[in-house]
Image: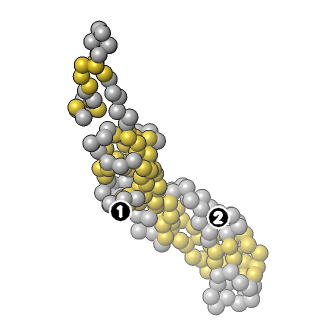
């Protein structure tokens, strides 16, 4: 494990200060950035975007040319890259039935799940219309996704005889008589 971890692609502000240094201190970062001598702490001028596990170091030099270095190891954590199924923004189900929603992360095997229903499994089964949210977490890198669930309108075919009289009504949804 590293000194700290961050989600891949996020930025991380870094700063340095010198303990027991004499006078103003200059800082040189491993990125090549240089802070002018200061009596306080120094911040890396631009927050680096973390795209892989990496080291950052800073060398502090005081007025007597005494130098000291510190290094931090940053572990980049892959976001889960979750897909929901059924695919699409909206899923449909038939009355008197239910639908199973599944969150499938592509980039982690030990992800945790938190659905808007309060359930914490990879999948939930629902039978009510609404918008459902899931937060998938990979060691603190969270990803939020959602899906709308809607009820199918039941088709109502009617069989009539040649004289126009209704003979029978049969309602089907998903192959099951309703």
Instruction: Give x and y (percent) for residue 67.
Output: 65, 80
Instruction: Give x and y (percent) for residue 79.
Output: 46, 55
Asked if residue 164 lies left or right of residue 47, the reply is: left
Which residue position holds label 1? 118
Question: Residue at the spot x=55%, y=55% of the render?
Answer: 9
Q: Residues within 10 Å of mark 1 (few under 14, many from 20)?
A: few
Query: Marks 1 and 2, Cα distance to the nearest angstrom?
Result: 36 Å
Q: Quadrant of residue 57?
A: bottom right
The residue lying toward the viewer, choosing from 111 and 49, is 111
Q: Residues within 10 Å of mark 2 (few under 14, many from 20)?
A: few
The quarter of the image holding the N terminus is bottom left
Q: Is residue 159 above or below residue 144?
A: above
Q: Which element type, helix, strand or loop, lies under badge 2?
A: loop
Question: Residue at the spot x=47%, y=55% of the render?
Answer: 144
Which residue position holds label 2? 47
Asked if residue 74 lies left or right of residue 95, the reply is: right
Q: Earlier in the sequence, mark 1 or mark 2?
A: 2
Instruction: Give x and y (percent) for residue 132.
Output: 42, 52
């Amino acid at each position: 494990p590293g000194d700290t971890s961050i989600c891949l692609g996020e930025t991380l502000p870094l700063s340095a200060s010198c303990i027991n240094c004499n006078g103003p201190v200059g800082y040189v970062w491993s990125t090549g950035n240089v802070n002018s001598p200061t009596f306080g702490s120094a911040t890396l001028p631009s927050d680096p975007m973390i795209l892989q596990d990496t080291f950052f170091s800073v060398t502090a030099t005081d007025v007597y040319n005494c130098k000291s270095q510190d290094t931090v190891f940053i572990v980049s954590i892959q976001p889960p890259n979750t897909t929901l199924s059924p695919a699409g923004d909206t899923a449909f189900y038939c009355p008197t039935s239910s639908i199973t929603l599944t969150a499938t992360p592509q980039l982690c095997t030990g992800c945790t799940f938190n659905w808007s229903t309060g359930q914490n499994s990879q999948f939930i089964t629902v039978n009510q219309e609404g918008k459902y949210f899931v937060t998938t977490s990979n060691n603190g890198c969270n990803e939020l996704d959602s899906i709308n669930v809607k009820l199918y309108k039941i088709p109502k075919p009617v069989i009539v005889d040649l004289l126009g009289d209704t003979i029978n009504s049969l309602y089907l949804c998903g192959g099951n008589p309703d």
